[in-house]
Amino acid sequence: MEITILLGSFVLLLLLRVPIALTLIISSILTGLYMDIDPAAILQRMVSGMNSFSLLAIPFFILAGEIMNEGGISRRLINFANVIIGKIRGGLAMVNVLASTFFGGISGSALADTSSLGSVLIPMMKKNGYDSDYAVSVTISSAAQGVLIPPSHNMIIYSTAAGGVSVGALFMGGLGPGLLLGLAFMILTYMIAVKRNYPAGDIIKKKDVPKILWEGILGLFTVVIIMGGILSGFFTATESAAIGALYAFIITFFIYREITLKHMKVILHKTFKTLAMVMFLIATSSSFGWLLALLQVPKMVSDTLIGISPNDYITILFIVLILLALGMVMDMAPLILIATPILLPVAMNVGIDPVHFGVLLILCLAVGLVTPPVGSVLFVGSAIGRISVERASLGMLPFYAAMIVILLVVAYFPQVSLFLPTLFGY
């Protein structure tokens, strides 16, 4: 009955479109009351869920992304990618993928990527003769790839939900699959460009190349500072995030100088708004996860999946299918917090390393970001491209296929995720 109340009220409130954070805490309180648990104990679990040093990195990552986004980094990264690869047939589509790879390493947000780069690249692609659905598909699929590229605050959320898995190991673990997915998109965009006879990119004047490269490298150096600090052992993830945010501030306001210091008020407002949502989710999911563990739901799920088939490969496939299905109906951050305590024990029971599972989880949920019925990135991309969600979804079919292939490779070949963490001693 306790499990029925917890999960039943959760599903019912979701169907009633109650915000996910409120759904989590209401379900927790109702279940706690039935079990004669003092509501104060549930509130204490909320507070303890946020009492983690690694979570301090999240506001700095969000702040750095907002500063660089508002300060014109999008246009500079597009120009930087255009210098590298824009001359090839379908070069503008490949520039889209490469710019998303760069931008994902700064913002860590697929929505920010789509909103920022998409608002520039989708109209540009349409103007250069690309089909609207193709322009949207390239933009949103490559944005989803960006959540794997470090630094990603979603990895920090997973680290907290998983009980303190190394953030540095997760960053390194996501890099290989993220780049592999980006490479798959680059190959796919080239093949489609040749088939549909899309044009090559515009030729950039030689006199403009040094400035473009210099400004692009300055922006990308944010990632170098963060990752270099973590891998060298000089900084923790939190300290690297803080230094990265400071560097982004200096670059934006004193070198790029597209906006004035007065604009910092807008940036801080956006940062605190995003941070409030993320931290409230972490707090409420902590109490929900505590009740799940208390009611032994993870063990029940593990026993059920193993009971269906003793074959580890089949169990891994079930985990992937469950995550893909959940990703189609819920957003990434709450799903990380809800699914991790349930499915991580199952994954570890079949020999999956926590770092490997974290990367697999993020990749599965990234597919959900661009999948109907509630894929947030799909909706934003469709709005920017001014096409229907149905048309955008049809245009995504080749990209869905590429994502599923890479997903299966990551699922069944753990070294794709674990090679770099092992190499750097995590």
Image: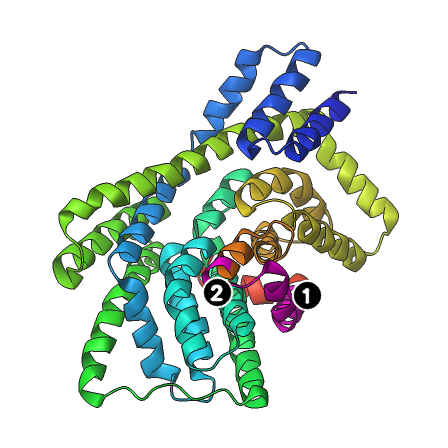
| Residue topped by disc 2 | 385
Residue 387 shown in magenta = yes
Amino acid type assigned to the residue bearing label 2 in the image: Gly
> Is 80 drawn above or below residue 425 in the view shown?
below
Q: Which of these two is toward me, 197 or 260? A: 197
Q: Which of these two is toward me, 163 or 202? A: 202
Amino acid type assigned to the residue bearing label 1 in the image: Leu
Q: Would residue 123 appear left or right of 239 to someone viewing this image?
A: right
Q: Residue at x 28, y 69 (%)?
A: 76
Q: Residue at x 53, y 12 (%)?
A: 40
* Magenta-drawn segment: 383-408
Query: Residue 236, which numbered label?
Result: none
Find numbered disc 1 in the image and state the secondary structure of the residue it sits on. Answer: helix
State which quarter of the image contains the N terminus. Answer: top right
Number of marks present in the image shown: 2
Viewer-nearest of discs 2 and 1? 2
Q: Which of these two is toward me, 234 or 328? A: 328
| Relative image position of residue 296 (x, y in whole percent) | 73, 29
Q: Residue at x 24, y 77 (%)?
A: 213
| Relative image position of residue 43 (x, y in whole percent) | 51, 18
| Relative image position of residue 211 (x, y in whole percent) | 19, 77
| Residue topped by disc 1 | 408
Residue 327 shown in magenta = no
Q: Earlier in the sequence, mark 2 or mark 1?
A: 2
> Is 232 drawn above or below residue 6 in the view shown?
below
Q: Would residue 172 appear left or right of 79 to someone viewing this image?
A: right
Does residue 151 show up?
no
Q: Would residue 78 appear left or right of 88 to someone viewing this image?
A: left
- Is the residue marked by circle 2 packed among few (<14), some (14-19), or many (20+) residues within 10 Å? many
| Relative image position of residue 49 (x, y in whole percent) | 49, 29
Task: Report, in whole angstroms, how far the alpha carbon at label 2 lies from the one at label 1.
Answer: 30 Å
- Is the residue marked by circle 1 packed among few (<14), some (14-19), or many (20+) residues within 10 Å? some
